[in-house]
Amino acid sequence: MRIISWNVLEAFSERHPETKVPLGRWKTLVKSAKWKSMEDVRRAAPNAKILNGERARFEVAGGNFRMIAAFDFRREIAFIKFIGTHAEYDRIDALKVSQF
C-alpha cells in the first residue's frame, strides 16, 4: 500500500523521537501489505482498533501516542488522518478527523 502523508509522520517522529522506531515498523508493515479489507488489517496488526469499514486506530510507542489511518483498499492507499498524544486523541472524533 502507498502511504499518503508519510512526511507528516516523519516530522512528528522528529518532535517525538520515541515514535521513530514504531512508526518505521508501521511503515514497513503497511508498504508491504496487500490488504483487501479491515479483516486483513486486524490480522496483520491485532492491537489495532477497527473503527469502521475504512478507519483504524493504532497505538504508537506503547499507547502514549495514537494514530488514525483510513484505507482505500481498492486503490491500495493508506491515508494518515491523525497522529497525536493519547490526550489529544481523546479530544477528537476518530471517525471524522482529517488532520492532514
Image (cartoon, grey):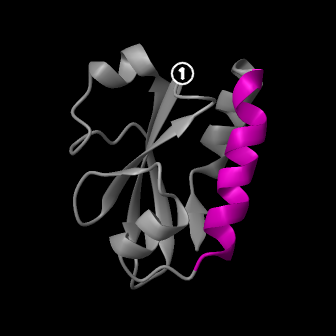
Mark 1 highlights which residue?
64
Residue in the image at 48% along x and 79% along y:
35
Q: Give the x, y percent position of residue 90.
A: 29, 21
Kind of residue indicated by mark 1: Asn
Magenta region includes residue 22: yes
Q: Give the x, y percent position of residue 5.
A: 57, 51
Image quadrant in which you'd find residue 15: top right
Viewport quadrant of the C terminus: top left
| Magenta segment, prevailing SS (helix, strand or loop) | helix
Within-10-Å neighbours for mark 1: few <14, some 14–19, many 20+: few
Residue in the image at 27% along x and 19% along y:
91
Image quadrant in which you'd find residue 57: top left
Segment colored magenta = 17-33
Specify whether 13 is left or right of 95: right
> Total label count?
1
Magenta region includes residue 10: no
